[in-house]
Amino acid sequence: RPYLVVAALFRGIDALKSFDTIYVITKGGPGHASETLTLYAFQMSFDYLHLGFSSAMLVGYFLVALGLSFLLAKYRRSEY
């Protein structure tokens, strides 16, 4: 069932980058209940002008997604 792992990875990446809908509807509220990593980075960079912090956070997010993708590719190759 490697297709379930692929679907979970794609769905997880898609859930973390759902910025536009959350920003338009709630802007991360009430409180910080619907705030995602990308929305937090947007607020840190444009509301608080912490550009270095938000870019470093998103580079870390990219590296985690890339690492999970490589692990998935290795898992799929070893299975066949």
Image (cartoon, helix red, strand yellow):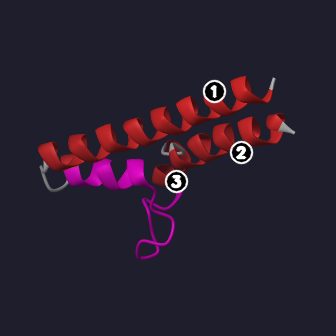
Residue 30 place in picture, x, y as percent = 46, 75
Residue 37 drawn above or below residue 68: below
> What amino acid type should be assigned to the residue bearing mark 3?
Ile
- Sequence-first tag of 2 and 3: 2
Q: Is residue 40 magenta?
A: yes
Q: Quadrant of residue 61?
A: top left
CB atoms of marks 2 and 3 within 8 Å: no
Residue 4 drawn above or below residue 31: above
Density class for disc 2 (Cα within 10 Å; few <14, some 14-19, many ≥20) is: few
Q: Residue at x 28, y 47 (%)?
A: 57
> What amino acid type should be assigned to the residue bearing mark 2?
Ala
Question: Disc 2 and disc 1: Cα gap in Å?
Answer: 14 Å
Instruction: Kindly identify which residue carries mark 3.
Output: 22
Determine whether, in the image, residue 9 is placed left or right of residue 2: left
Quarter the C terminus occupies:
top right
Which residues lie in the magenta part? 25-44
Density class for disc 1 (Cα within 10 Å; few <14, some 14-19, many ≥20) is: few
Helix or strand or loop: what does disc 3 sit on? Answer: helix
Density class for disc 3 (Cα within 10 Å; few <14, some 14-19, many ≥20) is: some
> What amino acid type should be assigned to the residue bearing mark 1?
Ala
Residue 32 place in picture, x, y as percent = 42, 71
Instruction: Kindly identify which residue carries mark 2.
Output: 8
Q: Residue furthest bottom?
A: 31
Question: Disc 3 and disc 1: Cα gap in Å?
Answer: 31 Å
Residue 62 drawn above or below residue 29: above
- Sequence-first tag of 3 and 1: 3
Residue 12 place in picture, x, y as percent = 62, 47
Instruction: Kindly identify which residue carries mark 1.
Output: 73
